[in-house]
Image: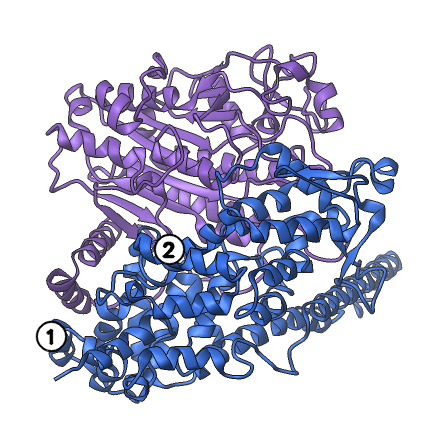
Chain colours: A blue, B purple
Amino acid sequence: MVNDSTRDAALALHRFGLGPRPGTIAAIASDPRGALLAELERPGIGRIDNPELLTSAQAARAAFEARAARQAQQIVAQRAQKEAERLKADSQKMGDDAGQSTATSAPPAQAEQALTIERQIILKEIKAKLDAALAAEIGFAERLVWFWSNHFCVSAEKVPNMAGGYEREAIRPHVLGRYVDMLLAVEGHPAMLVYLDNFISIGPNSVAGINRTRGLNENLAREILELHTLGVRTGYSQDDVLSFAKVLTGWTIISANDNPEHGAEFIFNRRLHEPGPQRVMDRTYADTGVEQGRAVLKELARHPAAATHVATKLARHFVADEPLPALVEKLDKIFRDTDGDLKEIAKGLITAPEAWTPVQSKLKRPSEWVLAMVRATGLRGDPERFARGQALLGEPMWRPPSPKGFADDEGAWIDTMGPRLDIANNFAERVAERIDPNGVVETALGPIASAETRAAVARAESRQQALALAFMSPEFQRR
Amino acid sequence: MALLHLPTRREMLVGTGSLFAWAHTPKLARAEGRDPRVLVIVLRGALDGLGMVAPVGDPDWVSLRGDRALVLDGKPAALPLDSFFALNPAMPNLHRLYQAQQAIIVHATATPYRERSHFDGQDVLESGLAKPGTTDSGWLNRALSSLAADGRVDPQGSRAFAVGPVTPLVVRGTAPIMSWSPQRLLPASDDTQMRLLDLYRHTDAKLARAFEGRRDLATLARTGGIETMPLREGEAQPNIGRIREYVGNVASTAAKYLAQPNGPRVGAASFVGWDTHINEGAAGGQLAALLGALDEAIAAIEKTMADAWSETVIAVVTEFGRTARINGTDGTDHGTATVAVLAGGALKGGRVIADWPGLRPADLHEGRDLKPTIDLRAVLKGVLRDHLRVDEVALATSIFPRSEDAKPMAGLLA
């Protein structure tokens, strides 16, 4: 007979973690809530300390240098080719075709290598993230990282070399810290300043604004208000967006072209900064340079609308598309009482009875589902396959479709069930020789496996089919 | 600053193209001896209408946009539409269709939404509601449901399909959805699919419904000879050629489905990448490249539809427009009114429909945006009523709730 605690252990691993690994349901069955809370206390939890990884600025510089070298190489090759053509033309004039090209084959090797540097950067980042997710016993802290990384998303489409470093530098250190510190880290991070165009935004009355033709860009200011802090329709106006955009002028990055040592790092450039006080959301902020922006961000982090926005998104993400108002209110109150202490909010989520409803109503996002599949087998994941699988299912890693991040409701994802089966089938084909389907059912579902799922797996015509059905079962798709 | 790759949303566009359709014929239209097709294309990110269709006859136009203004003697030269408007030179196919009376431009149009959030704006555009708010269905899906509810179409047989991993709101709703993924992966066997469907039918009705649709579409693809796109390797650098190929592929796949004698009749596709905050490039840059891709997609649909083109209407819509002036970074910020495009052989085309609001500072909405003078819902309602024969009361109540004042625009169809 299955006791409630074993059921809760399975539920905890799916709902708050990254899915069970062999043995984890039993390992936390005596006290699932305690195990979740204990994970948050582990030293270094949520961080990735890997000396092989470049910082985002180092990565951006390395890619820049590689691109510059590649460009030079191409020019040299073009010159050589022109020279060869000239020689050939000359020799043909002389009735001699011996001057066949000697230099047209300027090696593509250099270009290949330059591409490889960029590709290496992203692959190492993907591998580091995958390793962290596979190594976690439960994965609650990792799930919080994924949540906040999506809330404050950037896109590798625009910052291809910084997206992974951004998550390690701006998100992970604060995932159990204070919301305001994460907000300050995120909005001042070069990846965000580039992603939302602020790095080229110039105050119209700044020294640079007067001297040059370029000027204000309100993209970052708007998305901070709408997506990162208060939420849409919470009372800010177009004028607030504009004033805030002016406040943020000067928040930019150092050019890698001009500075090989510090390129792509944050800098506050007063020459670009709109001078004078600004009024944002009924408060006036004196022009204190970079502190003016930090002051606005701190005020936004304290705003009740930010607490409600974050509480609602967290409850929706972890528990249900339409979370119980009581749960949202609880998290909202903790946020306000603790000045946005994210660890306390995470604990509040775990200790709230409303978060433990036995119904698995939430459809996993593709990233969660693909990773749970790998964890259930106990195998090591292949970063490239992992990334490709997620991309096929519409959630390419660090490439959200918009600054709003990936959708977090069932309607957006339910039509991926067909491609999910193809992926499950493909994965099952590769691992079927090594993995016992009944073992996977016990490992990954155990007490929450339905009789129908057990029967379908037991009656499957092959191990591959049995595995695919287990991975596709509603109990494995939902959490 | 040559530090990083500057805005290329191409990969995102590749990842989010989508397509949907409904697999039956509106009975009422059929009874008139017609077999109408509708394809809705949503441009996400807010299209700069002034960058696509320039009011070259407006005396304030050039002073507003300066050397970024498209003009008839520019390089490249804008394509004249009438004495007042000219089309972006990146769109020769749309120009050709316009001259052949097969395209209509609606200018200074907008949904009822007046704020500047992309996401709320897209919700209003796709939900058909007067305001942003929680909703789980889109106007196109409800229009189809209304046809079924009136008994004009067998509800059991009605099917819609979505292409692309994420289902856009405009097609969500009670009319069933079928999905098709534009990438190739060896599919699970029919037997595995049947077993899974059986499991879902006994345990999870929502998953069962979602999965059933996918199977039906796969069958349609097999019988219709529709190829899927090859899967691309992960991080290869995308380029404008790939956008064109992808947009063209989604568009002509849609057209292949719609052209089949027993295929669907109503579809939708969506493309992202129109949020041109920096270096907009209406003439020869980013926006020109996107418009060129759209133009080729329209031409691909025309070609693929063949004879069925004469019964087709394509509607191209976006959530809102962009600022009338160029911003500080040679782009445009979020605005209000923009253009909508109708194209297809069923139209009474060759017209720009506009109640031109003017471009002087006092004419602009909140002193910064093109002022909306035509409700986009009126245009969409006109197409739905006169082409698909969707009931006018349903249009004003359930499909576009509280839209009585936006009467269906008459005379769009030939």
Circle nearer the viewer, 2 or 1:
2
Q: Looking at the image, which residue is at 63% across and 37% down?
A: A282
Q: Which residue is mark 2?
A: A328
Where residue A291 appears, x then y in whole percent? 75, 53
Q: Mark 2 packing: few (<14 Cα in 10 Å), some, or many (20+)?
A: many
Report whether mark 2 lies on the same chain as mark 1.
Answer: yes
SS at mark 2 in the image? helix
Is residue A211 something one can see in this rendering?
A: yes
- Identify which amino acid the numbered label 1 is placed on: Ala
Tell me the CA gap for discs 2 and 1. 34 Å
The image quadrant that residue A222 belongs to is: top right
Looking at the rendering, in which quadrant would you find the C terminus of chain A? bottom left
Q: Chain of mark 1?
A: A
Where residue B70 appears, x then y in whole percent? 67, 25
Is residue B279 something one can see in this rendering?
A: no
Between B396 and B167, the one lying in front of the other is: B396
Q: Looking at the image, which residue is at 70% across and 73% down?
A: A109
Q: Is residue B375 above or below residue A396?
A: above
Between B80 and B406, the one lying in front of the other is: B406
Between A43 and A132, the one lying in front of the other is: A43
Where residue B172 appears, x then y in whole percent? 29, 43
Find residue A405 and name its label: none
Q: Which residue is mark 1?
A: A451
Q: Looking at the image, which residue is at 47% across and 73% down?
A: A142
- Identify which amino acid the numbered label 2 is placed on: Val
Q: Chain of mark 2?
A: A
